[in-house]
Image: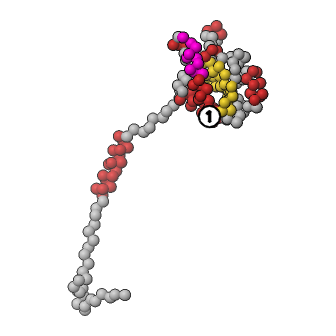
Amino acid sequence: MATLNVPQSGKAVKGSTRKPIPGVDLTAMVDLAFLLITFFMLTTSLSKMNVMDIAKPIPVTDPGQLAPWPASKTLTILLGKDNKAVYYLGRATDGQMHVANVSQIRKAILENRQFVANTHREAKDKEMYVIIKPTATSVFRNFVDLVDEMHINKVNTYAIDDKYVLAEEASFMKGKGI
């Protein structure tokens, strides 16, 4: 351990003087930081929420006011268990039902939309309608994925019917084990 030689007079020996450490006042830096944070908070815009519009039908008291539903351009998709879906174009009694994985339903939507566009002459009739029917055995994630597919494929008119599964649909799904 080194010792400092201090003479009896109380004066330090040459070369052992201590210089005071200069102090840095950071008050201005802190003020600038808070000004910059405030500036960026006030000038940036937060991300806007993307919300999907849901149109709820108005109850009709007179059944004569309802327009006929065009079955020739209506695609019905039933969600079942094990990520399977049944789809058909037209009426359940007339249409040929197909089974597909929910992850591959986009192909069926695009094919049927093209078929509807090719078979109808007028521009207003070329739009396809979709009815989504989640069953009791389906998973909510598959339903959300299907609604996302409607948005991705720009299917503007679709309805969700979770109450009415036709007897033909139920028997087909039961026969396929879905």
Q: Quadrant of the C terminus?
A: top right
Q: Is residue 177 left or right of residue 141?
A: right
Q: Tell me the residue at 23%/83% (across/down).
A: 15
Q: Position of residue 64 (x, y in %)?
A: 64, 7
Q: Position of residue 16 (x, y in %)?
A: 25, 83
Whether 104 is drawn above or below 118: the answer is below
Residue 38 is at least partly visible in this image: yes
Local SS, label 1: helix
Q: Magenta span covers which residues?
A: 112-121
Residue 125 percent coordinates (x, y): 55, 13
Please, what is the three-letter code of the amino acid marked with disc 1? Ser
In the displayed orientation, state which residue is furthest to the bottom. 8
Secondary structure mostly seen in the magenta stretch: helix
Q: Report the coloring of the rendering.
A: secondary structure
Q: Which residue is mark 1?
A: 103
Count residues near mark 1 (Cα–Cα under 10 Å), then give few for <14, some for 14-19, many for 20+. some
118 within the magenta span:
yes
Q: Nearer the viewer, residue 21 or 158?
A: 158
Q: Assess whether residue 53 is covered by the magenta stretch.
A: no
Residue at image position (59%, 28%) is 107
> Where residue 112 sits in the image (x, y, percent)?
60, 21
> Which quarter of the figure is the N terminus placed in?
bottom left
User: Residue drawn at (63%, 14%), measured in percent from left and top?
Assistant: 72
Q: Quadrant of residue 7?
A: bottom left
In this rendering, does residue 66 appear at all? no
Residue toward you, 100 or 41: 100
Q: Point out the residue furthest to the top here.
A: 64
Placement of 73 over or under 154, stated as above or below: above
Position of 36 relative to 130 (above/below): below
Q: What's the residue at 56%, 16% (across, down)?
A: 118
